[in-house]
Image (cartoon, grey):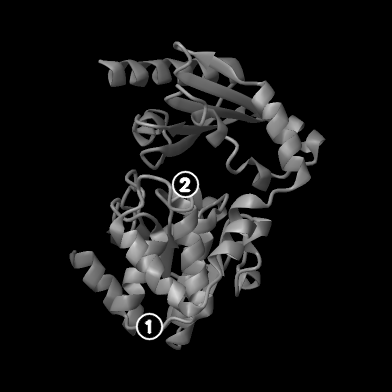
């Protein structure tokens, strides 16, 4: 991995870094951002942290989360951009153009659909989470972890493995987690905060989502439909959408779960979950991306025509699986 060696050299020798994660930030993106940022600051570097959107409430307790900025920054092409957990530059939102003007972009990610947009790329689809890659980098940099960095990495890895129940969880994942638990973390309290506690509006929205379920192809495909208007009427936030699509896949006999979220009359967000289908490939057919078992896309147009397009592709991938 020639780029990995160059990335280590850049992180060790350069002084100024802007670190950016993706829109609609999840636990892996936030945990990786905070851990990497704190580690580099501990090395004496000048670091600023950015996400194109607010941090979900359940992650705001993490150390240094209040330091993450959300507004566009002045362009300085000489500052090294470190992009974390983003499969493509479109997911950087308002920061996309500024990042692309930089002379050096370090792209660190584990999505199989990553487009290698950096001047230096460290993309490892075999890693359970970007947080796992960050852990390895900090080891190579000989950074001494503390409880704060360890907890950020624990959140990053535990969220992207579904609390270690997804198939991307490996023996190495458990070795990394075992090392992090040496820093006096409380995994029970973290799990309660991250996975179990949800707002009342979430459950009201979930009730609406469950009542919208449609089943196709002999109950092999389950579809939910929600809208921005419905979300707002229930008092739910965009954060409350996280995890709802999983209820489709969890139905016995369902292979492919889909959530249609109607953002507006001309924009549709689609989430995919599966048991065996490679939904990153399905999302890729629709100009999206993600993980093998969890992916998504954004589409422009009217809902009915877009739904038909998505379902046509979904039927096709299911047929391919059965053949």
Residue at 45 percent of width and 11 percent of height: 218
Asked if residue 239 is positioned above or below residue 121 in the image, the reply reads above
The spot of residue 296 in percent (x, y) is 47, 36
The spot of residue 271 in percent (x, y) is 51, 34
Graded by Cα atoms within 10 Å as few (under 14), some (14 to 19) or many (20 or more), the crowding at tag 2 reads few
Name the image quarter holding residue 60.
bottom right
Q: Nearer the viewer, residue 100 or 272?
A: 272
Pick out the residue farthest to the front: 188
Visible residue check, residue 47: no
Q: Nearer the viewer, residue 33 or 104?
A: 33
- Quadrant where the C terminus sits is top left
The spot of residue 138 in percent (x, y) is 36, 76
Visible residue check, residue 164: yes
Question: In the image, which disc is placed on residue 90?
Answer: 2
Quick check: 22 left or right of 64?
Answer: left
Asked if residue 281 is positioned above or below residue 215 in the image, the reply reads below
Graded by Cα atoms within 10 Å as few (under 14), some (14 to 19) or many (20 or more), the crowding at tag 1 reads some
Quick check: 108 left or right of 34?
Answer: left
Q: At numbered mark 1, what does the secondary structure look like: helix, strand or loop?
A: loop
Pick out the residue farthest to the left: 2
Residue at 37 percent of width and 83 percent of height: 143
Q: Earlier in the sequence, mark 2 or mark 1?
A: 2
Q: At numbered mark 2, what does the secondary structure look like: helix, strand or loop?
A: helix
Q: Mark 1 = which residue?
A: 143
- Quadrant where the N terminus sits is bottom left
Q: Nearer the viewer, residue 128 or 73?
A: 128
Residue at 46 percent of width and 23 percent of height: 254
Quick check: 277 left or right of 299?
Answer: left
Q: How many marks?
A: 2
Asked if residue 205 is positioned above or below residue 15 in the image, the reply reads above
Pick out the residue farthest to the top: 218
């Amino acid at each position: 991995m020639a780029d990995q060696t160059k990335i280590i050299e850049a992180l060790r020798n350069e002084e100024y870094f802007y670190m950016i994660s993706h829109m609609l930030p999840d636990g892996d993106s936030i945990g990786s951002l905070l851990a990497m940022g704190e580690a580099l600051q501990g090395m004496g570097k000048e670091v600023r942290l950015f996400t194109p959107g607010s941090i979900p409430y359940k992650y705001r307790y993490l150390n240094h989360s209040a330091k993450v900025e959300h507004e566009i920054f002045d362009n300085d092409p000489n500052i090294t951009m470190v992009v974390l957990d983003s499969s493509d530059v479109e997911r950087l939102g308002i920061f996309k153009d500024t990042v692309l003007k930089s002379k050096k972009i370090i792209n660190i990610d584990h999505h199989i659909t990553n487009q290698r947009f950096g001047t230096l790329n460290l993309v490892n689809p075999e890693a359970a989470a970007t947080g796992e890659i960050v852990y390895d980098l900090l080891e190579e940099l000989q950074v001494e972890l503390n409880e704060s960095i360890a907890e950020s990495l624990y959140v990053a890895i535990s969220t992207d493995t579904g609390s270690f129940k997804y198939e991307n969880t490996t023996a190495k994942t458990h070795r990394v987690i075992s090392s992090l638990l040496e820093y006096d973390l409380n995994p029970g309290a973290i799990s309660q905060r991250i996975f179990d506690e949800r707002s009342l509006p979430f459950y009201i929205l979930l009730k609406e989502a469950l009542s919208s379920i449609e089943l196709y192809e002999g109950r092999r495909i389950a579809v939910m439909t929600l809208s921005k208007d419905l979300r707002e009427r229930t008092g739910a936030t965009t954060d409350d959408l996280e995890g709802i699509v999983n209820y489709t896949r969890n139905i016995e006999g369902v292979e492919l779960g889909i959530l249609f979220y109607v953002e507006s009359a001309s924009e549709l967000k689609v989430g995919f979950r599966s048991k065996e289908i490679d939904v990153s490939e399905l999302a890729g057919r629709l100009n999206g991306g993600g993980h093998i078992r969890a992916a998504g896309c954004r589409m422009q147009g009217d809902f009915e025509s877009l739904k038909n397009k998505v379902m046509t592709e979904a039927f096709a991938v299911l047929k391919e699986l059965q053949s």
